[in-house]
């Protein structure tokens, strides 16, 4: 078995939606990008596996989260954002402003077209 055949600790994350073959399943492209960014930041040493697991666990277990796990990647992004702020890598206000910009871009993008940050009418 090669190193490529061994899933990373993040890929084995409890609660991560999986296909019948055991591969991660992403409901939207942004979820796959959030996953990849998390893996990259972990591999670069921005945070440890234990720090990541704790941050994700806190988000997944917050009151009001979807019982069926449908908001799992919303929890994932919230955990990643919180961890980046806690580590001093990012500023909470900057993350919020960027999130709002992407939302405006999504609302301004015609159906079927790729959402680009440049579509934010306030940029």
Image: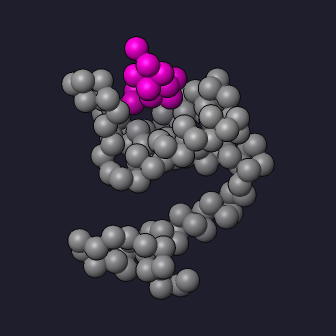
Q: Residue 48: give x, y in percent of width and height.
A: 67, 28
Above or below for 89 versus 75: below
Give the image quarter of residue 50.
top right
Q: Residue 25: give x, y in percent of width and height.
A: 31, 37
Let me know if residue 53 is in the magenta part.
no
Which residue occupies 48% across, 47% down?
A: 34
Judged from this view, the residue extending furthest toward the right is 88
Above or below for 80 versus 22: below
Give the image quarter of residue 90.
bottom right
Decide if residue 41 is on the left or right side of residue 65. Answer: right
Decide if residue 112 is on the left or right side of residue 8. Answer: left
Judged from this view, the residue extending furthest toward the top is 1
> Where does the C terminus fall, quadrant-wise?
bottom right
Q: Nearer the viewer, residue 2 or 63?
A: 2
Decide if residue 106 is on the left or right side of residue 59. Answer: left
Which residue occupies 61% across, 48% down?
A: 81
Let me know if residue 2 is in the magenta part.
yes
Q: Nearer the viewer, residue 54 or 29?
A: 29
Q: Is residue 28 visible?
A: yes
Secondary structure predominantly adopted by residues drawn in magenta: loop
Which residue occupies 41% across, 53% down?
A: 30
Which residue occupies 40% across, 46% down?
A: 32
Q: Residue 121: give x, y in percent of width and height.
A: 47, 85
Give the residues in magenta: 1-16
Above or below for 28 versus 50: below
Q: Nearer the viewer, residue 73 or 42?
A: 42
Q: Is residue 61 visible?
A: no
């Amino acid at each position: 078995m090669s190193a490529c055949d061994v899933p990373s600790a993040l890929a084995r994350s409890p609660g991560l939606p999986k296909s019948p073959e055991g591969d991660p399943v992403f409901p939207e492209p942004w979820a796959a990008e959030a996953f990849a960014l998390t893996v990259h930041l972990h591999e670069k040493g921005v945070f440890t596996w234990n720090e990541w697991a704790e941050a994700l666990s806190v988000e997944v277990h917050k009151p009001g989260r979807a019982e069926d796990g449908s908001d799992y990647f919303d929890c994932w992004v919230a955990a990643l954002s919180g961890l980046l702020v806690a580590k001093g890598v990012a500023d909470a206000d900057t993350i919020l402003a960027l999130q709002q910009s992407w939302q405006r871009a999504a609302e301004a993008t015609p159906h079927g077209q790729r959402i680009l940050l440049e579509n934010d009418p306030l940029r």
